[in-house]
Amino acid sequence: MTGAVTIWTYDWVPNGPRGHVRDIRLRWALEEAGLPYTVATVPVADRGPDHLARQPFAQVPFIEDDGIRIFESGACLLHLAEKSEILMPRDPQLRADTLQWIIAALNSVEMVTVPWWYIRMKGVSDNPLAGWMRQRFERLDAVLAERDWLVDNRFTAADILMADVLRMPGKLEQLEEFAALKAYLARACDRPAFRKAVRDQLDHFEAADAKRKKAGD
Ligand SMILES: N[C@@H](CCC(=O)N[C@@H](CS)C(=O)NCC(=O)O)C(=O)O
């Protein structure tokens, strides 16, 4: 039996990213699995050598589990998924299916959605990645029209990653014509573990606001 996993996130972020900071993926996984965890912080305003030693791109999240340190939300999620059959089926084919969909979420969907989102934030009206992103959604929509979840029609860590990747495009109304994707995202976000993870992240940053306000008084 090992101790609780520690998830690192920022000590504070502005309102925009709240609820979307990627520690949510790890909170969500541990909530689904019913495993204990604590949350620790690094200063967002001063990403010094200690932070870089943990995450060379000066980002979050990263975790520590019984002396093992890992960065990249996908790698952290894979590590956590090994801890519970709820997150990662033990059957070899279903395990392979879970791995493939986790990598697909990162490397076939998020690798388009994040640059699309950055370009959109720059105010470019004719986003050059829109068609590529749409192709990905069309294919994923066809898959999810046939089943509720990506692997074996049961919830796994792959759904945590895929649903979280789809949240921002969903918020920005890019899923409107993809009924199966919209329903999938709503289904995932309706899970008690997701709701708790979001609430806890929002509370974390609200507590940071209160602390900053007090310090400024
Ligand atoms: N590929 C990384 C991306 C991490 C990432 O983008 N983290 C954001 C917070 S959700 C961050 O730290 N952004 C600040 C920055 O990139 O400087 C992962 O999945 O862990």
Image (cartoon, rainbow, N blue to C red):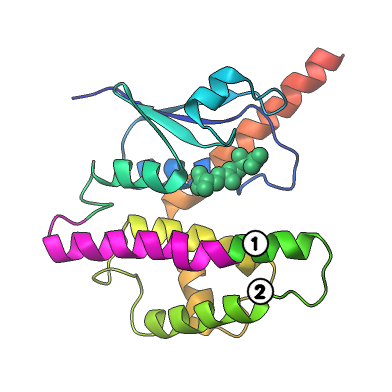
Q: 136 left or right of 94?
A: right
Disc 1 from disc 2: Cα separation:
8 Å
Q: Quadrant of residue 130?
A: bottom right
Q: In the rendered structure, are the residues bearing label 1 and label 2 in contact, judged by CB atoms less than 8 Å apart?
A: yes
Mark identifier at residue 129? 2
Looking at the figure, which quarter contains the C terminus? top right
Q: Residue 166's x, y, as percent?
A: 54, 65
**Element at badge 2?**
loop
**Pointer 1 residue:** 115
> Within the magenta stretch, is there residue 39?
no
Pick the front one: 99 or 18: 99
**What's under tag 1, amino acid-wise?**
Pro
> Within the magenta stretch, is there residue 111?
yes
Residue 137 showing in the rendered view: yes
Which residue occupies 42% across, 56% down? 160
Pick the front one: 158 or 45: 45
